[in-house]
Amino acid sequence: MPKVVLTGGGTAGHVTPNLALLPELYKRGFEVFYIGSKNGMEVDLVRETGLPYFSVSAGKLRRYFDIKNISDTGRILKGFLQSIKILKKIKPDVVFSKGGFVTSPVVWASWLLKIPIVLHESDITPGLANKLSLPFAGIVCVSFPETKECLSGKNTVVTGIPIRQELFGGDAATGRKLCGFTDRRPVMMIIGGSQGSQTINGVIRKGLQAFLNSFQVCHICGKGGIDENLSKLSGYRQFEYVKAELPHLFAMSDIIISRAGATTLFEIVALKKLNILVPLGKKASRGDQILNAKSFEKHGLSKVITEEDLTVDSLIAACREVLENKDLYYENMKKTEYSDSTAKIADIIQCVIEQK
């Protein structure tokens, strides 16, 4: 039975695409293992699936000087040695790396042990961990055509992002019941990313009464983000984080306000949901979400508001614009090549194994 090691961690976007591959990999008779960090969010997400989980030490990689770079270098070296030991034990036929700081030592150890590596980059421009892993990968799967252009010389395939099949099985009535909503008014859902967004949360709550005049509002606000003073407000439902509920909440939603992490974008478009994107600004990121959002806007799939321009008025105006042009957005989403890629990536993994 062929063996596949999946690795990725740090944020949901580095984990859920790996988990989305599981049904397809199992269907093809692969034995699957996961390598992640000891304390990252991937620990609980992966163990819920029953997948054999191995943890390694991970250190953050930075583009700037920080005294923590010294201790983190030690953690990375430790993770590299742990990865060698784990990979020798598993003896995988291929390693599939989804990105995040935990993956670099796993990729380097795989290369040292001559284990084929397939790497996946979700964003238009590679993150630092993937940049450090690129020279060791045999095949690089990318989500955006623009990414292939900036990785010339690499064996690059545009695949899109694997999407969890359970997201397509949501029931709108169940979602409304979870939120205490009726079927007589449209629903706006706010997704601030796996960590939540104070900026988006603040604007939503500042203009909440105005939004409630037109919508019922489902607000996924992140850990510690719930405002208890608003918990009994009719037509407004808050969640810190959702798991099993998410497919039903997607199904009931008429318009989604979201950050622009690549995984969430592909999920929204695959589900054919009207959306307004508020990408994380350059002050708090490397600007990858801005590029992701601009690409989706260029293809007529999304409306974008920069974090700097986000106000109650700008969000109300954007909602109005999207709803007035909803037929065009739906048509563009039907035509898009940004589709589920589980089978395509599984084909690549299988091909790598067969060519060993």
Image (cartoon, grey):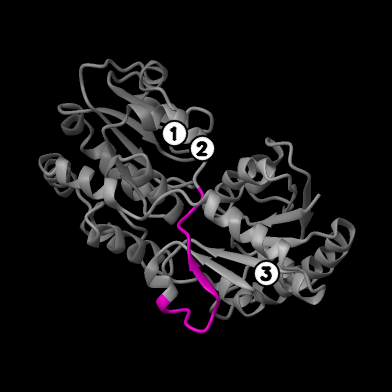
The answer to whether residue 66 is seen in the rendering is yes
Inspect the magenta stretch and tell me whether residue 150 lies in it: yes
Q: Residue furthest front?
A: 354
Would you call the spot at circle 1 few (<14 residues within 10 Å), some (14-19), or many (20 or more)?
some
Per the rendering, the mark at residue 104 is 3
Please say if 120 is above or below 317: below
Would you call the spot at circle 3 few (<14 residues within 10 Å), some (14-19), or many (20 or more)?
many
Please say if 133 is above or below 142: below
In which quadrant of the rendered image does the C terminus lie?
Answer: bottom right
Front position in the image: 225 or 304: 304
Would you call the spot at circle 2 few (<14 residues within 10 Å), some (14-19), or many (20 or more)?
few
Front position in the image: 105 or 325: 325
Residue that carries the numbered disc 2 in the rendered image? 165
Q: Earlier in the sequence, mark 3 or mark 1?
A: 3
Q: Position of residue 153 (x, y in %)?
A: 52, 84
Alpha carbon separation for disc pair 2 and 1: 6 Å
- Residue occupying the point 78% across, 66% down: 79
Q: Position of residue 266 (x, y in %)?
A: 40, 50
Amino acid bearing label 3: Ser
Inspect the magenta stretch and tell me whether residue 88 lies in it: no
> Which span is picked out in magenta?
149-162
In the displayed structure, does residue 164 sit left or right of residue 262? right
Residue that carries the numbered disc 1 in the rendered image? 168
Q: Position of residue 2 (x, y in %)?
A: 78, 53
